[in-house]
Image: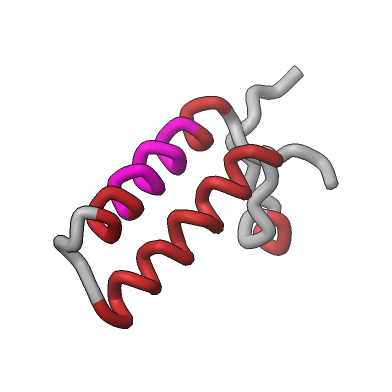
């Protein structure tokens, strides 16, 4: 897998993931929507850690700096 996420993209995803997890664990959002947000937070965290977004690949999107 070739990296296709830049630093800003990764940081934004991690912040959004933290907000979603916070909403779930504080009980602000519960039920199916809460679980959905928690799963989305996990996906955002995973894609940020590996610097690869599978949804970017088919469209040829890359937020990495050009060499």
Q: In which quarter of the image is residue 5?
A: top right
Q: Quadrant of residue 65?
A: top right
- What x and y, as percent, mark residue 48? 58, 40
The residue lying toward the viewer, choosing from 14 and 4, is 14
| Identity of the residue furthest to the left in this view | 28
User: Residue at horizontal 55%, vertical 57%?
Assistant: 43
The residue lying toward the viewer, choosing from 63 and 54, is 54
| Identity of the residue furthest to the right in this view | 1
The figure's colour scheme reads: secondary structure
Residue 16 on the magenta segment: yes
- Left or right for 62, reference 28: right
- What x and y, as percent, mark residue 7? 55, 26
What secondary structure is the stretch in magenta mostly built from?
A: helix
The residue lying toward the viewer, choosing from 9 and 42, is 42
How many numbered tags mark residues here?
0
Residue 10 on the magenta segment: no
Q: Which quadrant is home to the C terminus?
A: top right
Question: Eyeballing the image, is 29 above or below 50?
Answer: below
User: Residue at horizontal 64%, vertical 38%?
Assistant: 49
- Left or right for 16, reference 7: left
Q: What stretch is highlighted in magenta?
A: 11-20
Question: Eyeballing the image, is 1 above or below 41?
Answer: above
- Left or right for 63, reference 67: left
| Identity of the residue furthest to the front in this view | 26
User: Residue at horizontal 59%, vertical 36%?
Assistant: 63
Question: Eyeballing the image, is 28 above or below 10?
Answer: below
User: Residue at horizontal 46%, vertical 31%?
Assistant: 11
| Identity of the residue furthest to the bottom in this view | 32
Q: Quadrant of residue 50?
A: top right
- What x and y, as percent, mark residue 55? 62, 61
């Amino acid at each position: 897998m070739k990296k296709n996420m830049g630093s800003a993209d990764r940081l934004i995803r991690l912040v959004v993931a933290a907000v979603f997890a916070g909403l779930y664990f504080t009980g602000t959002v519960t039920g199916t929507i809460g679980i959905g947000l928690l799963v989305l937070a996990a996906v955002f965290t995973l894609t940020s850690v590996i610097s690869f977004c599978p949804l970017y690949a088919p469209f040829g999107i890359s937020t990495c700096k050009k060499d």
